[in-house]
């Protein structure tokens, strides 16, 4: 899907893609695939892939020590992404993962197409979803410490990563 | 060239591309074209374009206040880029802009193809060059303060930007 979206990656990078199920063992419905292109002490550049109808669970990036928390810009490369952020409830085109209504509390909807982008301030809760065609996007951010992210769903105990 | 390289950009973005001649009035030989995708107080994401046989002059990113200086990763999207950084002289495939030998002092050569990337520490001098096919690349960095960059060529007084 990444290559089909026009992004050239090496074979080594392709083999390093992480499949993240957030410990929920429900990957097809809740999860994300992550290719880390750059990871330094200051910035993080990733390609995120959502399978068809896959949802990345609601989460936020808390402060860590002197760092106010991760600031992240997501830019869509392929597919349509339904993004949910703080604000008035405009929920319309997305769907809530069955039985998980309590864990998807942000309901302000932003429908994003290729070349659209959104910047999330530290601490800002968000979740996002792809539909039938799936989606590929860039995540440009300050240093990522994914293991310290906060999640609304208490069943997400930690980030489980399975190397494909 | 950006769209041909497979990067989807909006018309507004296309109109915001900056043509930078570094005040040298010699754009075809020394210059760079810059599309800024993200510019916050913490990170900067740009698409850089080199025309055929165009060279970005040698420069570095100095410390600014509490900031140790810009850390930058350049990732090639299209074309071959000849990159020059500190280290032993392995200069072979590139060329020096006529009459400018004194201002291109880094001679360790790194030949970069699509999906290759290089991370430059703050203060690390570098310059780079495209050949006949030109080049398109991403620049992923911490906060950019281009006007404060250092340049080896004393004729570069400041960054002159001409909006196309």
Image (cartoon, coloured by chain):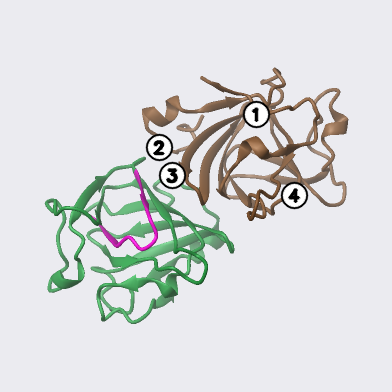
Chain colours: A green, B brown
Range shown magenta: A117-130
In the rendered image, which residue does mark 4 sit on? B124
In the rendered image, which residue does mark 2 sit on? B8
Q: Where is residue A114 in the image (x, y as percent from the top left)?
A: 33, 42
**Rendering quarter of residue B23:** top right
Crowding at label 1, few (<14), some or many (≥20) Cα neighbours within 10 Å?
some
Instruction: Tell me: A134 left or right of B19.
Output: left
In the rendered image, which residue does mark 1 sit on? B159
The chain under label 2 reads B
**What residue is rendered at 69% in x and 39% in y?**
B149
Disc 2 + disc 3, Cβ < 8 Å: yes
How far apart marks 2 and 3 lie (CA) works out to 9 Å
Depth order, front residue of A164/B140: B140
Same chain for mark 1 and mark 4? The answer is yes
Instruction: Tell me: B137 left or right of A116.
Output: right
How far apart marks 1 and 3 lie (CA) works out to 32 Å
The chain under label 3 reads A
The chain under label 1 reads B
**Rendering quarter of residue B20:** top right
């Amino acid at each position: 899907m990444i290559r089909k979206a026009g992004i050239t990656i090496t074979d080594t990078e392709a083999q390093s893609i992480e499949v993240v199920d957030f410990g929920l063992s429900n990957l097809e419905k809740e999860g994300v695939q992550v290719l880390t292109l750059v990871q330094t002490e200051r910035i993080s550049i990733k390609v995120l892939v959502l399978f068809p109808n896959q949802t990345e669970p609601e989460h936020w990036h808390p402060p860590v020590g002197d760092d106010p928390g991760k600031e992240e810009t997501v830019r869509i490369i392929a597919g349509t992404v339904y993004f949910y952020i703080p604000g008035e409830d405009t929920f319309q085109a997305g769907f809530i993962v069955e039985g998980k209504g309590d864990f998807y509390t942000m309901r302000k909807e932003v429908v994003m197409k290729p070349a659209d982008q959104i910047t999330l301030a530290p601490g800002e809760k968000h979740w996002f979803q792809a539909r039938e065609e799936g989606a590929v996007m860039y995540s440009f951010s300050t240093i990522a410490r994914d293991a310290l992210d906060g999640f609304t769903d208490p069943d997400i105990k930690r980030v489980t990563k399975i190397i494909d």
